[in-house]
Image (tube, grey):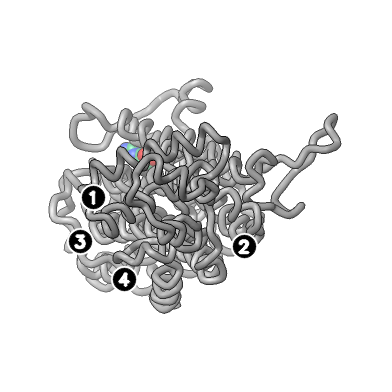
Amino acid sequence: MWGGRFAGGPSAIMGAINASIGFDRKMWRQDIRGSLAHAAMLAHVGVISAQDEAAIRDGLNAIAAEIEAGTFQFREDLEDIHFNVEARLTERVGEAGKRLHTGRSRNDQVALDVRLWVRDAIDGLDAQVADVMRALVARAAEHADTVMPGFTHLQPAQPTTFGHHLLAYVEMLSRDRGRMADARRRMNESPLGAAALCGTGFPIDRHMTAAALGFDGPTRNSLDSVASRDFAIEFLSACAICATNLSRFAEEIVIWTNPYFNFVKLSDAFTTGSSIMPQKRNPDAAELVRAKPGRITGALVGLLTVMKGLPLTYGKDMQEDKEGLFDAAENLALALAATAGMVRDMRPVTDRLESAAGAGFSTATDLADWLVRELKFPFRDAHHVTGRLVAAAEGRGVDLSALTIEEMRAVEPRIHPGVFDVLSVGASVRSRTSYGGTAPANVAAMAREWEERLA
Ligand code: ARG
């Protein structure tokens, strides 16, 4: 492919470190798509003949069929997907194949292929995130009034509902979709035609190839076009954030399925056993989703590090963008699929959630708020009095609602039996009607709203 000025061949080590075909073959669809658009444009502007274009088109389509069928011979000595496809094309269609690379370089070709690959990955991941959201929304609608403990510091804080908790993740995931969409919008420009780095003297039509490949237009600077991978970094950053969000949910599933918690059950479909301990049910899928940010954030940091300090324009360093990129997208897809599966599979243990929701003096804030409303306490004083009531209950080893009115009056004489109305878990969640609050009616309405948005 470039042997003209070379007398000897590369050493085996040179071949091994140089080749990317082992991983960039994943971009074969994008490579062929780009070449088809390039050839059509070359014929349109008269750089190649219509017959050559037809031969190239047939040849590329036949190669696509070979790869699809698994009969294509990928050759490491041909370095990468671009050379592999081009060499096979010339093998199949002769002279015409040798004309395909006019007015283009592997530098703009690879920049194009990676962009197309990332764009396809974004579209696939976006559909998967939407699927997880739909699963969460359906469970949230089902459990809008299933009470459970709300935590801060993983300590019992205030009662909430299972539905409200799930909808928190819906919000996070919707921002993940927004980040993916932003990245897609910014990256949707075609670098094809930047050629090696300075553009070309051939009368190519970059607007035509950009439109044919679904881009908003061509990139505006040829040097930037071949030198930049910030679109991939941005995508990886969106992947890392999404994976991080999923990992928090996964960790909660690990906690919730622990028998000491027993908040939810996963079926056999999403648990594994132990080879030695017959009683075990391990939430392996959740643990693996919890672990995925390791490699996904690793890919982000990896590419940032590859690109840091790299002078313009293309450097072979940039070939190192791909493995992490592919791995991150594939593993995020797996994590999303596993999360959707677990959401649909899990069964909340509602009586256990309810009793846990009332434990740990979780309605203490409701009591303090009652003192403010009923007895006109300033909130700070109400907080203090409630703290003393919690201490009294704790001393007796009972919940707040089990204190007698006399015991309460020993702390604050003006307390009357109306206080008991606010100490139940149900009353607590029902009272939190502020916009975005945990009241079951709010949660049901928000679940409906999401159902419509995701329909
Ligand atoms: N395999 C290369 C990569 O992934 C393609 C571009 C090679 N360009 C070059 N001038 N050597 O970056």
Image position of 94 with respect to 443: above or below: above
Task: Decide: few, some or many residues near mark 2? Use Cα within 10 Å; few <14, some 14-19, many ≥20.
Answer: some
Residue contact at pointers 3 and 4, CB within 8 angstroms: no
Disc 3 packing (10 Å; few <14; some 14–19; many ≥20): many
Residue bearing the label numbered 2: 344
From this view, report whether residue 137 is shown above or below residue 376: below
Asked if ligand 1 lies within 8 A of label 1, the reply is no
| N-term mark: 1 or 3 | 3
Where disc 4 sits, the SS reads helix
Identify the disc placed on residue 212: 4
Instruction: From the image, tell me which residue sits under label 3.
Output: 218
Q: Residues within 10 Å of mark 4 (few under 14, many from 20)?
A: some
Q: Quadrant of ligand 1?
A: top left
195 and 126: which is toward the camera: 126
Location of residue 398 in the rendering, given as x and y in whole percent from the top left corner: 56, 41
Disc 2 or disc 3, which is closer to the eye? Answer: 2
Quadrant placement of the N terminus: top left
At x 21% / y 27%, what residue is drawn? 309
Q: Is residue 176 left or right of residue 199?
A: right
Circle 1 SS class:
loop
